[in-house]
Amino acid sequence: GTLRVIQDPGELQVTAGDKVALGCRVEVAEGWVQLRMEWVKDGGPGVLCAARLHLVTPTPLAPCAPWVQLAWQYPQATLSLLRAQGNDSGHYLCRVTLEI
């Protein structure tokens, strides 16, 4: 099947202390059992946040780290940084794997 992932916003400028929301829209042409979603940040220690997501089961604000939360309601996932800091600047990537 076809898997399409769209991140939004493409670029964002924030002030230290602001809450930041990064979106990841997932479009799948065929039915699926679950997705594995990973958020990675350039220059970071690896995966910032990871979760297995189901089509019909929303994930309300799952904590990934003390300052990071992930929410899921098909077809949109939102990664929230609760209080942006200077070291949060960089490029974030939503990586999605379709699990069958």
Image: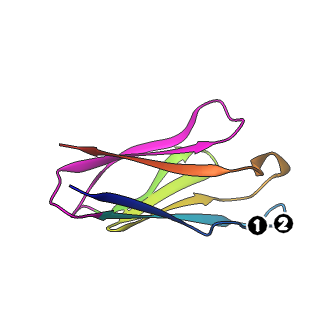
Where residue 27 sits: x, y (%)? 32, 65
Against 44, residue 81 (above or below) is below
Label 1: few (<14), some or many (≥20) within 10 Å? Answer: few
User: Image quarter for residue 57?
Assistant: bottom left
Question: Is 8 on the left or on the right of 15, as rendered?
Answer: left
Task: Specify whether residue 52 is painted magenta.
Answer: yes
In the image as oriented, which residue stretches furthest toward the front?
A: 2
The image quadrant where one finds the C terminus is: top left
Per the rendering, the mark at residue 15 is: 2
Image marks 1 and 2: residues in contact by CB distance under 8 Å:
yes
User: Image quarter for residue 8?
Assistant: bottom right
Question: Disc 1 and disc 2: Cα gap in Å?
Answer: 6 Å
Residue type, label 1: Asp
Residue numbers of the magenta segment = 28-57
Way the structure is coloured: rainbow
Task: Specify whether residue 15 is painted magenta.
Answer: no
Question: Is 74 on the left or on the right of 87, as rendered?
Answer: left
Where residue 24 sits: x, y (%)? 47, 62
Label 2: few (<14), some or many (≥20) within 10 Å? Answer: few
Q: Which residue is mark 1?
A: 18
Where residue 54 sits: x, y (%)? 25, 55
Q: Secondary structure at mark 1?
A: loop
